[in-house]
């Protein structure tokens, strides 16, 4: 009923920047909380940043000051601007959204992920 599609990943050198996007579509009445998570090889998925419908944000300590999360409610789209990237930022980045459906009910949805590789 709801699809989340990430884009913007790729290969970047240390110190570089990338901007991830997550577009939500489907039977959406409203989106409450959205967030970015990442999973590196051999590690558990971890929170990167979250943003509420009122633009309250929260960041993992490891990305504070380097990453910025934002959203465009009119487009049901979320972004993650990543600056000063480090090799340890290499991971698959996943989009998450807590969605209130047009029909009824509220559910958690995940995207399929986009690969970010930071390497020289």
Image: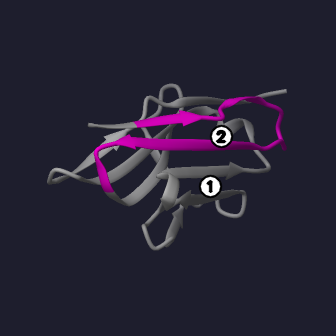
The picture places residue 76, in percent across and down from the top left corner, at: 47, 52
Q: Which mark is residue 62?
A: 1
Residue 29 in the image: above or below residue 86:
below
- Inspect the magenta stretch and tell me whether residue 1 lies in it: no
Label 2 vs label 1: CA separation?
A: 9 Å
Q: Which mark is residue 89?
A: 2
Q: How many marks?
A: 2
Q: Residue at x 15, y 54 (%)?
A: 105
Q: Residue at x 52, y 43 (%)?
A: 22
The picture places residue 90, in percent across and down from the top left corner, at: 64, 33
Range shown magenta:
4-29
12 or 110: nearer the viewer? 110
Q: Quadrant of the N terminus?
A: top left
Label 2 sits on a secondary structure element that is helix
Q: Main secondary structure of the magenta part?
A: strand
Label 1 sits on a secondary structure element that is loop
Q: Residue at x 62, y 50 (%)?
A: 80
Earlier residue among tags 2 and 1: 1
43 or 1: nearer the viewer? 1
For residue 92, what is the image quadrant? top right
99 on left or right of 11: left
The single residue placed furthest to the left in the displayed view is 104
19 on left or right of 27: right
Report crowding for label 2: few under 14, some 14 to 19, many 20 or more residues within 10 A (C-alpha). many
């Amino acid at each position: 009923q709801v699809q989340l599609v990430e884009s913007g990943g790729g290969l970047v050198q240390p110190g570089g920047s990338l901007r991830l996007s997550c577009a939500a579509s489907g039977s959406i009445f409203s989106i409450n909380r959205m967030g970015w998570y990442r999973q590196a090889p051999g590690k558990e998925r971890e929170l990167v940043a979250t943003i509420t419908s009122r633009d309250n944000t929260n960041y993992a300590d490891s990305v504070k000051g380097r990453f910025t999360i934002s959203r465009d409610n009119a487009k049901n789209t979320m972004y993650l601007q990543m600056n000063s990237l480090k090799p340890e930022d290499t991971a698959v980045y996943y989009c998450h959204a807590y969605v209130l459906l047009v029909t009824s009910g509220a559910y958690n949805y995940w995207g399929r992920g986009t690969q970010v590789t930071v390497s020289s």
